[in-house]
Image: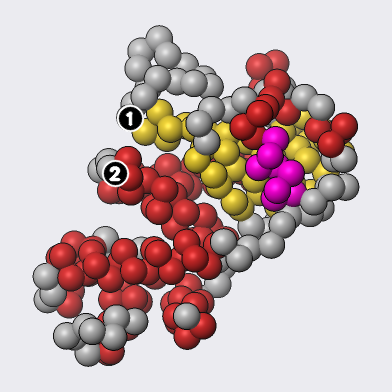
Amino acid sequence: MLKQAKISQYVQRKILRYFCEDLTALKTAGFLKLNRKTVDLYFNVFRQKILEHLVQEAQFSGEVEIDESYFGARRVRGKRGRGAAGKTPVFGILKRDGKVSVTIVKNCSREELLPIIQGKVLEGSTIHSDGWKAYDGLILNGYDHYRVYHSHNEFARGKNHINGIESFWSYAKRRLSKFNGLASHRFHIHLKECEFRWNHRNQNLYAIMLKIFQKS
């Protein structure tokens, strides 16, 4: 993994295994009696490889859910909903019974979100969303579009819901909370790690990571 490393390949693989089990760098360092900075170095290499792998993901088709969420410090009193002060907006696209893709965005305007949708979701797909105005006109862009209106206390109407992407938001926020705050320049790589882990949640992550390294 690191050709210039001073530790054995066996120990490197143990670091990778603990990473795949989602242990923190601190716990991994303790188990293997390594310096925390050494483990951090390896974890960063693993995350960079994940980023490179995710770039190759194919476009989505079929039944797709879209939504936005906000990550960061606790909400400031009086500031709610889209554009909540001090938070980072993230846009998510999820193929039902499949994978998710997340992108940090400047804002949740139509101008910001539509190019992402068109780049990630094939025309002819069915998109499910909430009632956010940025999604107006998706039918004109070649998609079937169904909505649920949370503002009217509507969360599901038959197959019309966004429960899948909302489940991912809950998972990502719960997982990222264990880091007790992330520097802004590190948020992206950790968010994409959440995407990768979610997409392979029912698979052998260690075997997948080994294949990724073998291809590089």
Across and down, in percent, residue 11 comes to 24, 85
Is residue 21 among the parts visible in the rendering? no
Tell me the tag on residue 182. Answer: 2
Residue depicted at x 40% and y 20%: 85
Asked where in the image residue 19 lies, by quadrant, the reply is: bottom left
Name the residue: 49% across, 21% down.
Answer: 83
Q: Amino acid at mark 2?
A: Leu
Who is closer to the viewer here, 183 or 64?
A: 183
**Dot 1: few (<14), some (14–19), or many (≥20) neighbours within 10 Å?**
few
Which residue is at the front of the view, 205 or 45? 45
Q: Give the residue drawn at x 23%, y 64%.
A: 40
Measuring from the top left, give residue 180's x and y in whole percent: 25, 43
Tell me where the magenta segment starts and ends, as one range.
114-121
Query: What kind of element bears circle 1?
Result: loop
User: What quarter of the picture does the N terminus occupy?
Assistant: bottom left
Query: In this rendering, would 6 be left or right of 68?
Result: left
